[in-house]
Image (spheres, rainbow, N blue to C red):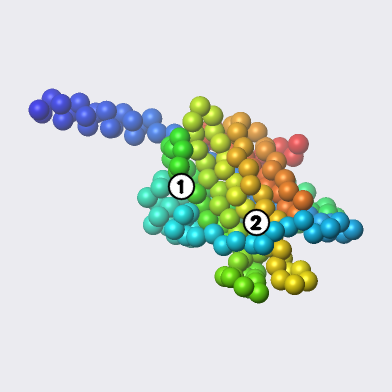
Amino acid sequence: MNKLLTAALLTLISVAAHADTWRVDILIYSDRDYGFGAPQIGIAPQGYSAEDAIPIDDRSRLATAGIRMLSEGDTLLGTQRQRLRNSQRFDPVLSLAWLQDDPPTRGGPKLLVRHGERLIPLSGEAVHRLEGTIGLTLRRFLHLDVDLQWSERVAGGLDATVLREQRRMRSEELHHLDSPRFGVLAHVIRQDQGAQGVGAN
């Protein structure tokens, strides 16, 4: 029995020693030119529940899930953010970065994003201008699961544009997820590879 217990403990220690930590950097931006001369193509906004995802300021639940949020200034996408800020068309809205231990193969934790003005529809619950979830999984390949909506006032109530995509992520590459109203730049890297700014291209 003691030998079995010792072997089990050694196995756990070995697994912990080889745990992989990944760094995720996200930059969400809006398109200022959206809607000029184009019809509204959005849908009625929906709320996202903290029961189904972890708010990015809930340190206890994040720690339990093996996630550590980094400060907004600690981003590897600073060059891209500045380039968007200098553009005439795009506006950087939110930068997110976190470290995540051993992303699960499926059904893992998702971060709950709520940012910007709270908007109250004619019926239903209030929503934030930017709201939704982002999650990282690791099966044979890394996948980023994005489900975000951008809400704004229109004649007769609120209108939302949804960006919903599951993207296979190649480590160290900059990925672009796009919708008519807003978009996401995403970068994932193994933490032991070091944190350096992502190239502008």
In the depicted structure, whether residue 36 falls above or below residue 185: below
Pointer 1 local density, CA inside 10 Å: few below 14, some 14–19, many at least 20: many
Q: Earlier in the sequence, mark 1 or mark 2?
A: 1
Label 2: few (<14), some (14–19) or many (≥20) C-alpha neighbours in 10 Å: many
Residue shown at 54% from the left, 29% from the top? 141
Quadrant (top left, top right, bottom left, bottom right) of the N terminus: top left
Q: To which quarter of the image does residue 58 belong?
A: bottom left
Quarter of the image where one finds residue 165: top right
Identify whether 148 is placed above or below 177. below
Labels 1 & 2 near each other (Cβ < 8 A):
no
Q: Which residue is mark 2?
A: 149
Q: Position of residue 195 (x, y in %)?
A: 57, 39
The residue lying at 39 percent from left, 57 percent from top is 60
For residue 29, side relative to residue 100 (left or right): right
Using the rendered image of the protein, determine whether residue 81 is visible from the camera's viewpoint.
no
Hey, what amino acid is under mark 1? Answer: Pro
Q: How many marks?
A: 2
Give the alpha-carbon distance from disc 1 to disc 2, as whole Å.
Answer: 19 Å
Q: Nearer the viewer, residue 198 or 93?
A: 93
In this view, the residue in front, 122 or 104, is: 122
Q: Amino acid at mark 2?
A: Gln
Local SS, label 1: loop
Residue at horizontal 65 percent and vertical 72 percent from the top? 121
